[in-house]
Amino acid sequence: MRPVLHRVVDRRRESDDVVTLALEPQGGRPWPFRAGQFHMLSAFGVGEAAISVSSPPGDAPVVEHTVRDVGPVTHAMCTAPPGTLVGVRGPFGTDWGIEGAAGDVVVAAGGIGLAPLRGAIHQLLASPRVERVFVVVGARSPAQVMFGEDLEVWATRGARVAVTVDVADRGWRGHVGLVTSLLGPLEYDPARTSALVCGPEIMMRFTARALLDRGVEPSRIRISLERNMQCGLGWCGHCQLGPLLLCRDGPVVTYDGAVPGLLLERER
Amino acid sequence: MIRRDVAEVVTAHPLLSGLPAPIIEELAGCARNVAFEAGALLLVEGSPADTFYLLRRGRVAIEVRSPVRGPLVIETTGPGDVVGWSWMVPPYRSQFDARALEPVGAVALDAVCLRTKAAADPSVGYLLLQRVSAVLIDRLQATRLRLLDLYEAPLAR
Amino acid sequence: MGHDDVVVIDDVGLDGLIGALREAGFEPAGPVVRDGAIVPGAIRGVGDLPRGWHDRQAPGHYRLVHSDDRRYFAWAVGPASWKAAVFPPVQEVWRAWERDGALVVSEPPVAGAPMAVIGARPCELAALAVLDGVLGRPPVADPGYETRRERAFLVVVDCAEPGGSCFCTSMGTGPAAADGFDLALTELDDEAGHRFLVRAGTDRGARVLSALATRPATDAELGAREDLLERARAAMGRSLDTDDLPGLLARNLEHPRWDEVAARCLACGNCTSVCPTCFCSDVRDTTDVTGEVRRTRTWASCFDLDHSYLHGNAVRSSTRARYRQWMTHKLSTWWDQFGMSGCVGCGRCITWCPVGIDLTEEAAAIRASDGTFGPGSTAAGAPTGSARVAP
């Protein structure tokens, strides 16, 4: 459970309360990980939080995490200036399964849910077996749309990118509406489509339903689930969701089997 | 000739596709092809709701004007969508502005004509209502979800 | 089990065993009477064991009574299991401090001498096997747990006097010790005298045993053991029908019984504190005045609101949701997660519940109206009925 020291070498603001931290291992290079996996990040003296890796797997000298300021640990992360030492453990959990992707791929993100998908989209666009990549993104407002530069890069590399917001002033030229409304007009072939969905659970549920209604196989819809994670190792018991230990069996799970019931389970 | 073109366009629109040919013929009798420049208003808040648009190309924003925040876009619609349903129920007055975001092509259905035909032949009215209801329910559900502030406010849950 | 495998010692022999283990480098520990309960403690010899003590257990009830019984192990289980011996309630994970501008992170070694447990119960060994499935699970085993677990010397005693809350026969974990021990004892006290039958379960157990003065057990003594176990099976205070139990609970998540039990449950977490398999822990950081940071891992309870904390809220905010999580985890989803039951039938959660909630009774109540209230059920008044109609 001992973290490896990393130095914050860059901090980029994505929106009001979201920053991307580039971390460099002290005296080394980042270890291998797969898109969709997460790390346990320590702010020394504050605590530890589970944060998905938001940069693509590869041989970059830094590994990026996109953090939203929602609690003491993430606040410390979001305000950590370059030079700060943080602790990193991992990588933990399941991934988006990009190696097996082929045909059409629909990537749907809500809010900060785009962060764990960012590396996956990079990889999809480089995969020879993947024909078309559709990226649909929902955000509260135009100011909350993250990774604007990436969205443009992905579009130039052949992804069909669409962004929608819940509300906007007239300066916004994009879509206004629910993220599922972007799925309807997409010309993917359901029989050869897999989908990666990440966002709030309600958003993932409705997005998955829209994909299922079009005929996408439930086993080919992957979603990323989140619960309280304190160890990443399956020891602490906090991340249970029914039969799943999400740090071990998740965060990425397929929609078929256990998940439809789980997402509707009244946990409260 | 023009009438036939409109009928084809009406048939092709998702709202009405698959309806029996005689019904399409009836509805096409109320239809005409229209085009708007970017920025043009299809509907104006407070004005009589006399037109029902079936969008064919271009996107249309549903807007509401606010003295402080300026015009706010509530929703955007595009090809295959419909714009305007205040024509269905009294007082037949548009509740929002509808503005073309880009050059728009649409079928404009005359509301008085539609209402007259629906009243004269309730089976036409029923089928039309059924199709429009499906769109209404879809948009209502999406609106309900947006009310949750899905992406941004876990703390306020 | 042949005759030669089972030998007999008396209480002097047991005392010698404790001494031999101490000489071999173990810290002997066993049941001791403290604060009105039989709990794990350090022992020097048989004199520290709870001779003549019996426990009277029922939902929400535990009392010790003393008699002139010569036996040391004529009781069921106390509130504390041997879990703490392998999984301490508070553990330092690491500490970090600054030295010459650099941050130093240091993990403490596993402290203390190996423990020799004298007088664990079969259900408690079963509980350790359950913990092995969680914390000792490769490829990521908890190293501290593994170390403590591997070096602990375990002497189990067959259960002769089950308590009013016990149901180990239902769970297949007792009253006889089947495996997982270094040595297994059966305590006999009849006209032939007070003595222990001893079996070795491991090579190191056999080595320790071979150094003691023993004699082979007789047929009569082996028969006496069978009789003792048969009486114990008949004396179980409770039973739990395990037939399709995981499925039963999984399909009854909306059963109104959860509301009923939630109305009684105080969400105090006693059941999780006494449970020999509950493994949840919190990981917390603290900083002292010198700036040294210490991360500790502390037993946690799923009855705490913070257990399911996510972005400023608890996912399981109601007592109903938390009780349901605890019970379905023990009896149902543990199978999904670890391939086994999370309950060994020791009955502690029943005895130590301040309001006497009995999970065997709760499971039976759900079974009695299985299928009436689950998702997809059409029963009138089903809690999900109206919600399902809404779009």
Image (cartoon, coloured by chain):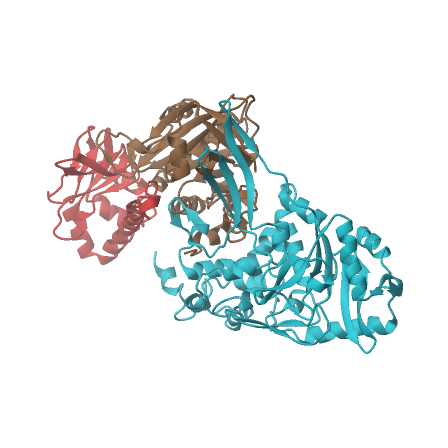
Would you place residue C168 above or below residue C333 in this image?
below
Q: Which of C253 and A104 is in front in this view?
A: C253
Q: In this view, does C185 lie to the left or right of C378?
A: right
Q: Where is residue A145 in the image (x, y as percent from the top left)?
A: 33, 32
| Residue A97 appearing in the image | no
Q: In this view, does A155 lie to the left or right of A177?
A: right
The colour applied to the residues of chain C in this rendering is cyan
Count of all numbered marks drawn on residues in the image? 0
The colour applied to the residues of chain A in this rendering is brown
Q: Nearer the viewer, residue C181 or C313?
A: C181
Q: Where is residue C161 in the image (x, y as percent from the top left)?
A: 68, 72
| Residue C72 appearing in the image | yes
Q: Which of C42 and C62 is in front in this view?
A: C42
Q: Position of residue C313 (x, y in %)?
A: 38, 49
Residue projecting furthest to the bottom = C191
Which image quarter: residue C146? top right
Would you place residue A14 above or below residue C14 in this image?
above
The colour applied to the residues of chain B in this rendering is red
Q: Residue at horizontal 35%, vertical 44%?
A: B154
Q: Position of residue C91 (x, y in %)?
A: 56, 45
Q: Is residue C6 left or right of residue A268?
A: right
Would you place residue A215 above or below residue B105 in this image?
below
Q: Nearer the viewer, residue C118 or A39?
A: C118
Which quadrant would the N terminus of chain B be assigned to in this image?
top left
Q: In this view, does A107 lie to the left or right of B19?
A: right
